Amino acid sequence: MAIVCRILFARGPGEKVKPLAEAFKNSAENDPYRARRSGKSQHRDGWGYVLLRDDSVYHYRSSKPVFEDEQGFSRLVELLEGDLILLAHTRASSQGSLGLFNVQPFAFSTRRGFSFWFLHNGDLDKEKVIELAGFDESDLEDASDSYAFSAYLCRVLKNPERDELLKHYSIGMSLARTTFNTATLFLLPGGSWRAFVTAYMTDKYWENPLHRDYARLIELDGDVFAVASSTLELYHDADWRNVPNGTAYLIRPDGIERLSLG
């Protein structure tokens, strides 16, 4: 049975993001939606985040479960001050080796002069990703499908703008075996940034209520704009809305554009 990690993207004032971070941690420790599918309720195969704040970037990964990494999580909470962008991921492995290497978000610097951090939950056809990118399969034997796709982006993405993002993330969507829920933070050489978030579930996955409840993303739009895994709604009472399947968000410093994948 395919496994889907828990993710959080949030932009807004740190004080408003803190309860979302707590809900993220709690969703990893006890996930009723996962328990209904498999009898297992935790996401314990490592966690990480990237935080952009005050012209600084903080990137952290740990092979510990977030709910057992007291020092690492406390440090994140301390950093949640002022206007910020947070991407967080807690892993339940489906492909690739266990351990720190496959913990997300992944960091890449491209040959085209921009950097990015990428996270994904779901299950991709890793062999096809490798084929499209022209990689050697043996080099990525122990890498996750998520790592392979982010390495593909690093090779082929010309810029982090609307048409180019839709082109390549729609390819990722077409390679999804379960879901293609992603969040990416791009850093540009002039000091600006872009963020891109996708929410996609295959028809077969969507048709099963247990899979759908577990894998869907939810959106919060107010003082904080957030897109998160469904379980966070159980730990943070807010005006959450289900994200329509096939939605993408392009977030710039001056606003948010909602788009369709495919």
Image: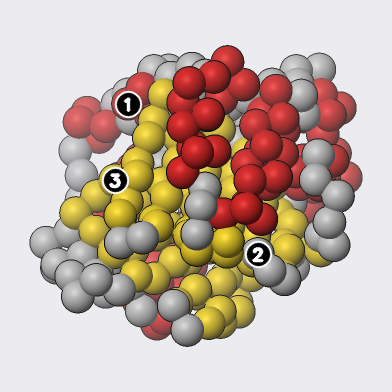
Decide if residue 246 is in sight here: no
Q: In the rendered image, which residue does mark 1 sit on?
A: 101
Q: Is residue 25 above or below residue 193?
A: above
Query: How crowded is the residue under tag 3: few (<14 C-alpha within 10 Å), some, or many (20+)?
Result: some
Identify the disc placed on residue 107. Answer: 3
Q: Are marks 2 and 3 in contact (CB under 8 Å)?
A: no
Residue 129 in the image: state x and y as whole percent.
36, 49
Q: CA distance from mark 2 to mark 3?
A: 25 Å
Snapshot quadrant of residue 123: top right
Query: How crowded is the residue under tag 2: few (<14 C-alpha within 10 Å), some, or many (20+)?
Result: some
What's the amino acid at mark 2?
A: Val
What's the amino acid at mark 3?
A: Ala
* Closer to the camera in the image, 201 or 182: 182
* Closer to the camera in the image, 117 or 69: 69
Residue located 30% across and 73% down the image? 192
What's the amino acid at mark 1?
A: Phe
> Would residue 42 be found to the left or right of residue 127 on screen?
right
Q: CA distance from mark 1 to mark 2?
A: 31 Å
Residue 199 in the image: state x and y as whole percent.
62, 60
- Judged from the image, the secondary structure of the residue bearing numbered disc 1 is helix
Q: Earlier in the sequence, mark 2 or mark 3?
A: 3
Q: Earlier in the sequence, mark 1 or mark 2?
A: 1
Residue 154 in the image: state x and y as whole percent.
24, 56
Q: In the rendered image, which residue does mark 2 sit on?
A: 224
